[in-house]
Amino acid sequence: MNLTDFRPRSRLVTKVTTIARPRFPVFDAHNHLAEPFGGGWDQKPLAALLDLLDQAGVVKYVDLDGGWGEEVLYRHLDLFKAKAPDRFQVFGGVDWSQWQTLGHRFPDWATERLVAQKAAGAQGLKIWKPFGLEVKDERGLLVKVDDPRLKPLWTAAGELGLPVMIHVADPVAFFDPIDETNERWEELGSHPEWAFTSPPYPGFLDILTDFLHLVKSHPATTFIGAHVGCYAENLGWVGAMLDECPNYAIDLSARLGELGRQPYSARRFLIQYQDRVLFGSDLGPDPDAYRLAYRFLETDDEYFNYNLSEVPGQGRWYVHGLHLPDEVLQKLYFGNASRLLGG
Ligand SMILES: [Zn+2]
């Protein structure tokens, strides 16, 4: 048998809690509605989407797909925001490809586009992970996350009241050599395009250090670090950044597997930073994915799969529930997002 065919079934007999609905209404601060992450809901009836969200107890849903481009933003504002304004927020984005053509005029142009996106109804700015990894300026040089030329853009986001949902870097192991010591070896085997082995890519900590500098240098702009502040493997680092930057918050999206394999630290962390953490799924409006996240946050169930797939996608380990207190759950599920994102 090859190791990749190994499918051990746990013979533990422990409590399994079924959570049909979250203990409090949920504001999903990080999700998508189109392909590839949102399940193609730009092609399906809105009533069916609202029905799924109702089933999952999700009362508000941030659609980050407007960050793919302005055409998508305007389409999503029409499809979702215009028809169910209380249920959705759509975030805009930056078209980095224009830096090549516009040269030194790019930062001012991007700032003008952000103003136009806000006027059209965008409620935040989404920055995808190519920023810091692949985005290049007019000379073909990599743009660092704290590049001072972008100051007008970040300042404008603050002045416009648009929170910046930002994802930089990726799991630490994606930057490591792909060998027998890499904890995401299987995942990188099925997604070789996710490898950012350094060099040639910048080092993981170089990107994160630039990120800290970016957030510190723009104290009047709200930044939300996606995926547990882009460093779920090191909650000490994320906590220190939250301590240093009052304008900074994080979301929980797509990191159950990381948090749940360090349940004692994760529970302490979420209680300590209960005012700075937003719930997010990042798995589309999928009720089963939501229920798994609720089980993880609400129960003390032990040793369960953090994915809906048979073999956990991010690594072959299981997780333990965090059984968070009610007042913390309420802030994570709704209060913090409502305060930072509005509505
Ligand atoms: Zn996402």
Image (tube, rainbow, N blue to C red):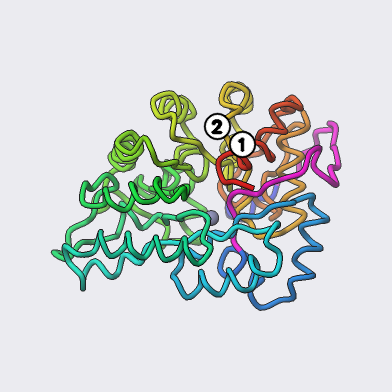
Residue 151: image x %, image y %? 26, 48
Vertical placement of residue 231 versus 157, above or below: above
Left or right for 145, reference 189: left
Q: Who is closer to the viewer here, 54 or 198?
A: 54
Q: Is residue 256 visible?
A: no
Q: Foreground: 306 or 242?
A: 242
Q: Earlier in the sequence, mark 1 or mark 2?
A: 2
Residue linked to disc 1: 336
Q: Position of residue 257 (x, y in %)?
A: 60, 41
Q: Is residue 13 magenta?
A: yes
Q: Is residue 107 visible?
A: yes
Secondary structure beneath disc 2? loop
Q: Going 39% across and 61% down the picture, which residue do you hit?
A: 114
Residue at the location (58% across, 63% down)? 37
Q: Is residue 32 left or right of residue 22?
A: left
Residue neighbourhood size for the residue with mark 1, other residues' Cα within 10 Å, grouped as few (<14), some (14–19), many (≥20): many
Between residue 237 and residue 332, name the one nearer to us.
Answer: 332
The residue depicted at 44 percent of the width and 42 percent of the height is 223
Indicate the amino acid at tag 1.
Answer: Asn
Q: Are marks 1 and 2 in contact (CB under 8 Å)?
A: yes
Which stretch appears magenta? 8-32
> Quarter of the image holding residue 261?
top right
Q: Secondary structure at mark 1?
A: helix
Residue 276 numbered mark, or none? 2
**Tag 2: amino acid:** Arg
Q: Position of residue 248 (x, y in %)?
A: 45, 35
Q: CA distance from mark 1 to mark 2?
A: 7 Å
In the rendered structure, the answer to whether residue 276 lies left or right of residue 331 reads left
- For residue 38, what is the image quadrant? bottom right
Mark 2, other Cα within 10 Å: few <14 / some 14–19 / many ≥20:
many
